Amino acid sequence: MSARANHNGHKLGEKAIEAKGLVKRFKTGRSFVEVLKSVDFDACHGDVTMVMGPSGSGKSTLIAALSGLLKPDEGKVRALEADDLWRLSNGRIDKFRLDHCGFIFQGFNLFPALTARQQVMTALHYQGASKAEAHARAQAALEEVGLGTKVNQRPSEMSGGEKQRVAIARALAKNPNLIFADEPTSALDGENGQVVIRLLRRAATERGAAVICVTHDPRLEAYADRVIHIEDGRILDDVRRTPDANPAPLSH
């Protein structure tokens, strides 16, 4: 892998995803509430893009529309080789998410009965990896996030920070081009939050993924290449910045 391209040959700084004119309305009673109001958005390979805004601003709806989870009422999403994500069949959208996207949520979304290694292997089985390959890749991903000694532990035996790291290992093991993180640090203390955001930073810098992180935590701005503020369904500002070399510790 060269310094200029990620594992799938995309150049760092190239647009990984681009949306134009996204509109999303939800019905409440007899009226509709417009949650996204003609939003334009893009994110590049190798960048951590922070989408920040208060609760109810539309940031989670934006992530869902970008990642193939929630169909917008209007607008277009061009993602990687898909010229218009929402014109694909449901099955092809599912396959796009499986092949190209990693998801990290605040609730971890782990299976209670599975060990850390099994959580990661399950995602790889769906992608068609053999058992031996899935085992090796899961082990490597868990070691990368510092859980090499906890691969056989189940969620009930783990702290919140460890559970979130399993979720990150599950996302990274797929080698995704697009990583969507929705409030990934909100359930964690400062130290664990720092571990999580540093892992996302590395996924962008070292793997060339486009990392799109929705948060209302201003402490995470220090790790971003770009900060987009959204409020009331509209983008207020979009600022490129240089990530801090030594960000201040996250502490509550």
Image (tube, rainbow, N blue to C red):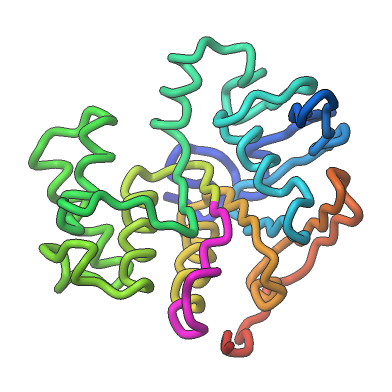
Q: Residue at x 55, y 69 (%)?
A: 186
The quadrant in which residue 115 appears is bottom left
Q: Residue at x 84, y 43 (%)?
A: 233
Q: Is residue 6 magenta?
A: no
Side of 199 relative to 169 (left or right): right
Q: Residue furthest front?
A: 29
- Quadrant position of residue 24: top right
Marker count (numbered): 0
Q: Residue furthest right?
A: 236
* Left or right for 88, reference 207: right
Bounds of the magenta segment: 181-192
Q: Is residue 158 above or below residue 126?
A: below
| x then y, percent, for residue 175 | 38, 45
When the figure is inspected, residue 146 is found, relative to residue 5, above or below; the finding is: below
Instruction: Tell me the residue at 45%/67% (across/down).
Output: 199
Residue 247, image x and y in percent? 62, 84
Locate residue 6, reporting x and y percent: 49, 46
**Residue 165 in picture, x, y percent from top left:** 35, 65
Residue closer to the observer: 213 or 178? 213
Q: Is residue 78 left or right of residue 88?
A: right
Residue 47 in the image: above or below residue 94: below
Q: Is residue 60 above or below residue 87?
A: below
- Choose between 252 and 166: the one closer to the eye: 252
> If the image is split into quadrants, where does the C terminus sit?
bottom right
* Residue in the foreground of this view, choosing between 144 and 163: 163
Please give left or right for residue 103 compared with residue 236 in the image.
Answer: left
Question: Was residue 185 drawn as part of the magenta stretch in this picture?
Answer: yes
Q: Residue at x 45, y 45 (%)?
A: 102
